[in-house]
Image (cartoon, rainbow, N blue to C red):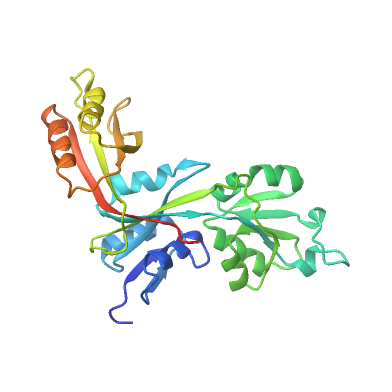
């Protein structure tokens, strides 16, 4: 695997792991797993890996602010691709420990549920309605939660996570699809200093960061107008604090167009002409889910 792509992600069995495999599904890859997202970013920044896989947005919870801020403030790693994946969460545990004589798991036998805080939030109604008595503990990833359950038998613990991780740690899926909404999709970014090619891609996006001038009333309107009259379609605009001064924000904008077009570079030039700072975070293929 000398020439295999080196990819950093959250632990094996997480959705980030599955996304990494999808980005390079036609190739053998060398994956390195980290418990926390900062170590994922740093791995690629140091050159230990070529790319990092970052969960950046979810249908239910919106943007993952911590990951967005790392992308903007802590590292300088271009976005190379994105993939939107249906994040199906499951309740995982030992059926023999939690089931009755008929093999049906019993909610009252579960004393604690472990998972990543985002996964917990995605399953709020299920936890409140089915396991209101169970203690909830958040950990660094859904895979880590399942690992902890596997290491602590006979305690009545269960986890929320993927089927892949359940199989890896020899546990059972007690109940499938415990997320509160069926349209629970997560958007993953592939970031890194190496180019990423996908000949099958037909949809391209560009992400930019716009910081407005302090003394230009109506600057945001001018930014949007530069896009609008060129009929450039924006899929997202979000404000985040610059962390430099209270009340000063930058705007994270996703655009349904490649930088290879004529219109987008011209729009950016117009935005810069009014005194805005523009940073192109990446121009990249948007890969479809193939379930």
- Is residue 226 toward the left or the right of residue 119 in the image? left
Observer able to see residue 224: yes
Furthest residue toward bottom:
1
- Is residue 245 toward the left or the right of residue 152 in the image? left
Residue 97, how many percent across, how many down?
Answer: 79, 67
Residue 112, how many percent across, how many down?
Answer: 71, 54
Q: Give above or below for 170 relative to 9.
A: below
Residue 291, how many percent across, how many down?
Answer: 50, 61
- Is residue 7 toward the left or the right of residue 232 in the image? right
Q: Give above or below for 121 relative to 93.
A: above
**Residue placed at 23% from the left, 32% from the top?**
227
Furthest residue toward top:
217
66 or 81: nearer the viewer: 81
Q: Quadrant of the N terminus?
A: bottom left
- Is residue 188 toward the left or the right of residue 230 in the image? right
Observer able to see residue 43: no
**Residue placed at 82% from the left, 64% from the top?**
99
How many numbered discs, if any?
0
Residue 106, how many percent across, how many down?
Answer: 81, 57
**Residue placed at 75% from the left, 47% from the top?**
130
**Residue placed at 35% from the left, 67% from the top?**
7
Q: Give above or below for 195 relative to 203.
A: below
154 or 274: nearer the viewer: 274
């Amino acid at each position: 695997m000398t020439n295999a792509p080196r990819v950093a992600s959250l632990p094996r069995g997480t959705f980030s792991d599955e996304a990494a495999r999808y980005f390079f599904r036609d190739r053998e890859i060398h994956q390195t797993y980290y418990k926390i997202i900062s170590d994922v970013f740093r791995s690629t920044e140091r050159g230990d890996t070529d790319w990092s896989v970052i969960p950046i947005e979810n249908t239910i919870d919106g943007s993952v602010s911590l990951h967005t801020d790392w992308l903007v403030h802590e590292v300088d790693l271009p976005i190379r691709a994105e993939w939107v994946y249906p994040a199906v969460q499951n309740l995982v545990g030992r059926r023999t420990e939690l089931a009755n004589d008929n093999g049906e798991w019993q909610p009252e036998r579960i004393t604690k549920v472990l998972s990543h805080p985002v996964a917990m939030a995605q399953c709020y109604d299920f936890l409140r309605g089915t396991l209101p008595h169970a203690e909830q503990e958040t950990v660094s990833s859904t895979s880590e939660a399942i690992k902890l359950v596997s290491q602590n038998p006979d305690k009545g613990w269960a986890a929320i996570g993927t089927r892949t991780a359940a199989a890896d740690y020899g546990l059972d899926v007690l109940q499938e699809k415990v997320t509160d909404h069926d349209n629970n999709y997560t958007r993953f970014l592939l970031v890194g200093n190496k180019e990423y090619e996908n000949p099958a891609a037909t949809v391209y996006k560009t992400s930019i960061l716009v910081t407005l001038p302090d003394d230009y009333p109506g600057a945001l309107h001018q930014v949007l107008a530069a896009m609008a009259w060129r009929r450039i379609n924006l899929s997202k605009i979000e404000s985040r604090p610059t962390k430099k001064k209270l009340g000063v924000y930058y705007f994270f904008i996703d655009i349904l167009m490649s930088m290879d077009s004529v219109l987008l570079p011209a729009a950016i030039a117009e935005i810069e002409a009014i005194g805005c700072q523009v940073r192109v975070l990446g121009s990249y293929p948007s890969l479809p889910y193939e379930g």
